[in-house]
Image: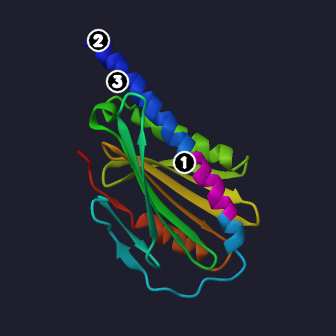
Amino acid sequence: MKDEGGRMKIMAQSTLRLHLSSRRFGFALCAFLFLLLSSTPSRAATWKKFAPPGGQFSVLLPGVPKGERKINKDKDGTQTIDQDYTLETADRLYMIGYQEHDAEVAKFINVAALLDEMVKTVAREASGKLKSRRTLRVNGFDGREVVAAIEGGGTLRFRVFWTGRRLYTALAAFPKRAGANADALRFLQSLSLAKNR
């Protein structure tokens, strides 16, 4: 039984590494997309609640995002599901997604360490342009928030939460324009999460 616990901890650490490596590319892509999108101001859009089937979350968005699902298999056969939704407007980028862990692996994950590591990853990607970081809670779930500068004069707001078996990430990238920060906050503050079993 003791060996089983050790094996599961190693699996949890491996899963964590898999998640961080897959997300690292996402942050770089976000900064790149922002540069492409930052030339034309967004037109006013109608914000609607987005709650995909099985997502166990809801959020307000100024349009319908594109979804992408990926299943990652570890060496021992356990799998992790990555589900991301992305919405690009004329000059803003919104991303919401989660990584779902196997129940046996999830119970060994150190939640505080996982959230802190995600914050460190974003801070590294921001290349020393970190503006702020803080802890927060949504629907009783622990989370972290990072605000960082993006090249070209924009800002990235990133939040991460753990809900039992899923690691949720949400980010908004936007320019220094009237209303852009308010829209990012509207998106992030509207996020509602449910516990995963």
In the picture, residue 151 is in which quadrant? bottom right
In the picture, residue 181 is in which quadrant? bottom right
The numbered dot on residue 23 is 1
Counting residues from the start of the chain, the first of labels 1 and 2 encountered is 2
Q: Position of residue 166 (x, y in %)?
A: 35, 46
Mark 2 to mark 3 CA distance (whole Å): 10 Å
The numbered dot on residue 8 is 3
**Quadrant location, the N terminus:** top left
The span picked out in magenta is: 23-32
Q: Position of residue 100 (x, y in %)?
A: 36, 46
Q: Is residue 149 magenta?
A: no
Under circle 2, the secondary element is helix
* 99 vs 192, nearest the viewer: 99
Under circle 3, the secondary element is helix
Q: Residue furthest right?
A: 152
* 191 vs 26, nearest the viewer: 26
In the image, taking residue 62 as reference, residue 101 lies left or right, namely left
